Image (spheres, rainbow, N blue to C red):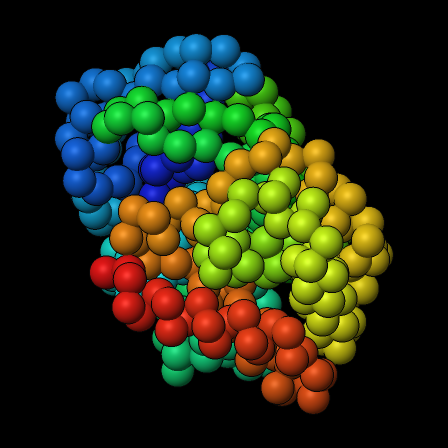
Amino acid sequence: MKVAVFGAGAIGGFIAAALARAGTEVCVVARGPHLRAVQSGRLRVHSEIGDFSVDVPAAADLREFEPPDYVLLTFKSHQWRAALPQLERAIAGGSVFVTLQNGLPFWYSKEYALESIDPGGRIRSAIPYERIIGGVVHASGRIVEPGIVHQSGGMLYPIGELDGRTTERIEALAHEFRRAGLRAPIEPEIRRNIWKKLVNNLALNLVSVLTRATVGTMLRDPGVRPLLRAIVEEGLAVARATGIDPGVDADERLQWAEHIADVKTSMLQDLEAGKRLELEPIGGAVVELAERYAVAVPHTQTVYALTKLLEASVCR
């Protein structure tokens, strides 16, 4: 099996390293100092499955490699415009694309494009729907320095065919993940899994950016927790309006979040680094769907609008 990891940062870099250590033929797409470090033979990992290093082929452009069997998409949603031309050769070559990105994916609906993520439906038009596997990342990590990744927060990466079938290709991918020490259960309702994570990100990420507070601080605050709960409830209502029942309630999701270490959300870390935020797939797409299905989401609309204004003034 040949796998390309497109976006080999903290999450993608760890997945690539774990797969390579297990014997999968892996190449990666990265950028900047991190890319140069990987190209020099340094992709080192400190993780829950041990500390190790691997040597993997790396480039700034996916087109430098032959089309692989699978392309794991681990870059951030706002990077789609630059990434899409690089996928052309893999699309023509029959690769399967696995989305392991935060928020709602561009393929969420087969009938229409999410303009907040995929303006004009360019991505949907380029990547055949039947060549996509959905996925969710339940893990965290950071690049300690170029070429060195620190992984934490679990090994769970649910994957699922968009139509819910169990196919040979998804079984093969799940097997490869298991060989690497990663949990990749095959989920017949991958959209449900996406929403369960998304509603937490919707509340915690956006409010953390506005308050600069850690997860634990927000959850313990008697004035902020009701706001978080209201946003989670609104997200769940939007999911149900689109025909997906996440099977959880707001209190359950906040209780689950209490078990997370008292850390800064990834979106707050990006804000502090002056980086663009993953705002549209997490906030913008929910607001867009709420408008489409006439679901009232006043709390979500407010924090989304404020976060978007903050991003415009702070992030490059």
Residue 161 appears left or right of 243:
left
Residue depicted at x 24% and y 28% = 146
- Viewer-proximal residue among 173 and 189: 189
Residue 106 seen: no
Residue depicted at x 43% and y 11% = 51
**Which image quarter: residue 29?**
top left
**Which image quarter: residue 7?**
top left
Residue depicted at x 64% and y 35% = 260
Residue 304 appears left or right of 218:
left
Q: Residue furthest front?
A: 222
- Viewer-proximal residue among 11 and 5: 11
- Viewer-proximal residue among 51 and 4: 51
Residue depicted at x 59% and y 35% = 262
Locate residue 132, reporting x and y percent: 52, 56
- Viewer-proximal residue among 315 and 55: 315
Tally the marks: 0
Residue 257 seen: yes
Image quarter where the N terminus lies is: top left
Locate residue 297, reporting x and y percent: 67, 78
Locate residue 201, reporting x and y percent: 59, 54
Image quarter where the C terminus lies is: bottom left
Q: Residue furthest top?
A: 51
The vertical placement of 221 against 168, above or below, is below
Locate residue 110, reporting x and y percent: 59, 74
The vertical placement of 77 against 254, above or below, is below
